[in-house]
Amino acid sequence: MHKITIFGMLGNDPEMRYLPDGKAVTSFSVASSGDNPNDPKKATWFKCTAWGKIAEACNQYLSKGQQVCIFGQMQSNEFGAPKIWFTNDQQPRANFEVTVQKVQFGRKSSGGVSDNSNDSIYNGGDQPVNKQQTNQQNTVSEDDIPF
């Protein structure tokens, strides 16, 4: 598995569900425009999955259109490539799937300008931490990783 950092915008509101054992799972998509943020047609989409307390925080604090920075592990096929699937009319598509380990919440942009002064970083603790309050590297508990 490959570590990845994605900076982008949420493409949909997070969807949270609970597994039979009570563990929370939240799914959402993130579009990252890379070098050209003004051309949404060239965005790369990532299908993100968060587990446990991180899943609950993502569901509570994230919404469609919000800026976000995801730190996680990219899931790939046995060759290290994205997962390939086919539409009903047999058109190939690729999914970049990411297991979220840490997330930085950004503000929703207004008029293309974002105010990131209150961004928060969440790594599985009880509450998001304002990035100005900490300079230490945050880690995720192994209990929050599904494998």
Image: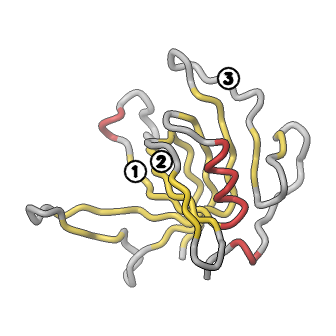
* Left or right relative to 32: residue 135: right
Q: In which quarter of the image is the N terminus?
A: bottom right
Task: Give the image location of residue 33, x and y in percent.
Answer: 43, 40
Element type where label 2 sits in the image? strand
* Spatial separation of the CA atoms under disc 1 and disc 2: 6 Å
Element type where label 1 sits in the image? strand
Say which label, 3 or 1, has the lower sequence index: 1
Q: How crowded is mark 2: few (under 14 residues within 10 Å), some or many (20 or more)?
A: many
Task: Give the image location of residue 127, x and y in percent.
Answer: 83, 50
Reply above or below: 147 against 138. Answer: below
* Spatial separation of the CA atoms under disc 3 and disc 1: 23 Å
Q: Residue furthest left?
A: 89
Determine which of the numbered discs, if any, sits on residue 30 in the image.
Answer: 2
Q: Which residue is drawn at 33% across and 40% down?
A: 42
Reply above or below: 89 against 131. Answer: below
The residue singled out by tag 1 in the image is: 45
Determine which of the numbered discs, if any, sits on residue 101 in the image.
Answer: none
Residue 107 picture quarter: top right
CB under 8 Å between callouts 3 and 1? no
Determine which of the numbered discs, if any, sits on residue 115 in the image.
Answer: 3
* Spatial separation of the CA atoms under disc 2 and disc 3: 19 Å
CB under 8 Å between callouts 1 and 2? yes
